[in-house]
Image (spheres, rainbow, N blue to C red):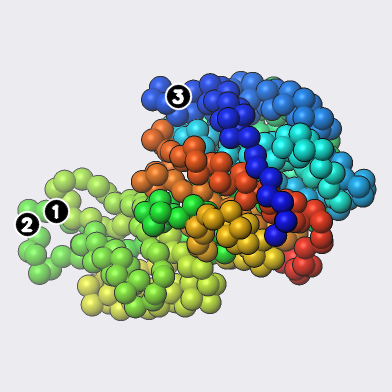
Amino acid sequence: MESTLYTINQKRLLQTLAVSSSIGPSKNGGLHRLALTEQDREMRDQLKKWFVEAGLSVRVDDFGNMYGRRTGKQEEGPVLAMGSHMDSQPSGGKFDGVLGVLTALEVIRTLNELGLETEYPIEIVNFTNEEGARFGPPMLGSGGIAEAFSKEYIYNIKDKEGTSFAEALRQIEYKGEEQNRLTNLLGFIELHIEQGPILAKENVDIGIVEGVQGMSWLNVEVKGESNHAGPTPMEDRKDALLSASKMISKINELHKEIKGLKTTVGQLDVYPNVPNVIPGSVSFSVDIRHEKDEVRKHAVERMKEQLSTMAFTNNADVVIQTTWNSDAVTFSNHMKEYMEQSAAARGYSSKRLFSGPGHDAKYIRHMAPAGMIFLPSQHGQSHNEKELTLEEDIEKGANVLLDVILKCTKQKIENIEVRNID
Ligand SMILES: [Zn+2]
C-alpha cells in the first residue's frame, strides 16, 4: 500500500451528507427523493455546485448521468471512475447510494487539499434512477451506458402518472449528450451500504464485495378445480391453493439441499379469491438467488422436478415459466486485494462477501474492471427511514476508497475480459 496514509476529512464529509439529507427529506428522518423529480433536480444542482467548487469539469449524458472529472498526468485517460446514485426509494434512507457519491467527492477534496496529482484522470459519477422506484426496472442510468437496455426502451418507460423517462429528464433540464457518456474506463469503484445484517452483526468495518449474486424469476401456475365450499367432499377436491401452499413450503426448504441458495415467494394470485369457493387456480412468483450460476440453474431444474411431482400427487396441474434471468457478476481481484491491503494497513477489520441486491457496479463491470466497498448497515435495515450507517464507519470507508483510488490511478488494473450482457 502507500507508504504514507492520507486521511479524509470526516467533519467535512458529514456536513456534506447533512446537506444531502435536507434535500427531499421524508417525514421520519429518511429521504423521499425519487429519480428525476424536483427534489432530484435540487440535489443535482447542489452536486454540480460542489463539483465546480472542487475544480471538476462537469458533464451530463443522455440518460442524465452526471460526471465530475479531475484531470490526471495523462490527460486523455483512461479514466478511473467512482460513484453511485443520489435518488432514493419513496421512504428511503439517507445513506443508500448517497454515500458512494459523497465519499467520492470527499476523496477528490482530499486530493485537492494535498495537492496530489494522479497518473490517470478521476471521475465522480451520479447514476440516474438506480432505485427503479419511479421508473422500473432499476439501474437504468448504468444499464443504459453499459448497453443492457436500449436508449429507446429507457426513454419510453413511464411512471404511474404517465410521464416518460425522456419527458422527466427534460422537465428537470438534465438531458445531456450521448457523447458525454462514461468511456475509456480504467476501472470503477462503488462504495455502498451493505443493506444486509452481516457486517454490523459480526462487527466488521469494511466489506469487500466478491460479486453480485445471479438471480432467476419464475412464475408458477397451479391449476385445480373451482367448486362450492359447502357440498364438495374434502376427498374429492382439487384445491389449487392447498397444492400451491405445499409447493411454497417445499421451495422454502430447497436451501437445505442446495447450500447458499435463497428462494423467495413474494407474490400470489388466487382465483377466484372468494371465501366460499375452492380455489381453482393459483399463480405465484419465485425469486431464486445464488452466487454461482451453475448452482442456480441446477436449483431451478430441481425445483421444477419437485413441483411437477407434487402436482401429480396432489391432483393438480402445474406450469412453470422462467420470466427473468440475471447472471452473477464477479468483481476485480486486484481491487479486492487493494481494499484488503488498505483495511489492514489502517487497522480496520474486513470481510469478503457477496451482494444480494444489484448495484450500478454490476452493469459497469461489463465495461471495465469494477469493485465495491460495503459499509455496515445497522440492524441490516435499508430501503426504509431507519437505515443507519455509523459516522465512524463512513470515515473508515472513505479512507479505504482514498487508498484504492490512489493505488488504481498509479497502475493499470488487470484487463479482465468484458462479458456480454444477455
Ligand atoms: Zn443503492
Question: Image point 26% across, 65% down: which residue?
Answer: 249
Q: Is 329 positioned to the left or the right of 283 in the image?
A: right
Question: Image point 45% across, 24% down: which residue?
Answer: 26
Q: Is residue 202 above or below residue 305?
A: above
- Please name whichever residue, 52 or 203, is drawn nearer the observer in this view of the structure: 203
Q: Is residue 84 visible?
A: no
Q: Is residue 106 visible?
A: yes
Tell me the kind of residue under disc 1: His
Badge 3 or badge 1: first in the primary sequence: 3
Tell me the SS state at disc 1.
Answer: strand
Q: Which residue is mark 2?
A: 231
Taking the view exactly as shown, the residue that stands out farthest to the front is 3
Q: Is residue 14 above or below residue 413?
A: above
- The C terminus appears in which quarter of the rendering? bottom right
Tell me the kind of residue under disc 2: Pro
Please state which of the two labelled residues, at mark 3 or mark 1, is closer to the viewer.
3
- Ligand 1 within 8 angstroms of badge 2 C-beta: no
Q: Is residue 335 above or below residue 164?
A: below
Q: Is residue 271 above or below residue 235?
A: above
Crowding at mark 1 (Cα within 10 Å: few <14, some 14-19, many 20+): few
Q: CA distance from mark 1 to mark 2?
A: 6 Å
Q: Is 192 positioned to the left or the right of 247 in the image?
A: right
Q: Which residue is mark 1?
A: 228
In the image, which disc is placed on residue 26?
A: 3
